[in-house]
Amino acid sequence: MKRSGFIVTILGAVVVLLMVGNALRLAKANNSASAFVQNTIFSNKIVIFSKSYCPYCFRAKRIFSDLNEKPHVVELDLRDDGGQIQYVLLDLVGRRTVPQVFVNGKHIGGSDDLKTAVQNGTLQKLLGWCSYCFVALHKMKVACCRGPYAKGSDAVKI
């Protein structure tokens, strides 16, 4: 009788140690994923957390392509830590769905949020475009074009 109780105690201790070990590995993986997400968001002007097969992600990528902007895309389904990254996004922005779009470190949201930001001019402002005509100023080397593609003295050089 005493021997079987001892074996049960040992087995219980082994199970607890395995659970603690798995929890520590998971915490370490989540810290790594969290560091990756933070570093990616703040090291790139435009970031899309995406899945390669997702039609909403295609739409987000197409919006930036149409604006001649090149986002940094993280395809979660092609990464071993993609699931962990999605849980980091859940903690960070309250969503784990894709796409999740960030511009200059600011969370825009998903595909519908991005479309709305384009329609109301929020995205263009975050990208540093002219608030008057939404020309990509960093490509024109002016601070404001003061009208549709103004040239000469009306353009404020930067």
Image: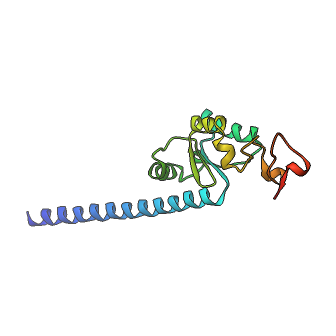
Determine which quarter of the picture holds residue 9: bottom left
Quadrant including the C terminus:
bottom right
* Residue depicted at x 78% and y 47%: 136
* Residue depicted at x 32% and y 60%: 19
* Relative to 44, residue 100 above or below: above
Q: Residue furthest front?
A: 153
**Does the rendering let one see residue 109?**
yes
**Number of callouts in the render?**
0
Determine which quarter of the picture holds residue 13: bottom left
Determine which quarter of the picture holds residue 6: bottom left
Q: Which percent across, then down, holds residue 101?
A: 60, 46
Quadrant including the N terminus:
bottom left
Which of these two is toward me, 123 or 26?
A: 123
Q: Which percent across, then down, holds residue 77?
A: 58, 45
Q: Residue furthest right?
A: 152
Horizontal side of 145 relative to 51 (left or right) equals right
Horizontal side of 101 relative to 15 (left or right) equals right
Which of these two is toward me, 158 or 20?
A: 158
Horizontal side of 76 relative to 126 (left or right) equals left
Which of these two is toward me, 85 or 45?
A: 45
**Does the rendering let one see residue 53?**
no
* Relative to 40, residue 97 above or below: above
Q: Which percent across, then down, holds residue 149?
A: 85, 42
Q: How is the image coloured?
A: rainbow
* Residue depicted at x 63% and y 40%: 52
* Residue depicted at x 23% and y 62%: 11
Q: Which percent across, then down, holds residue 156?
A: 83, 54
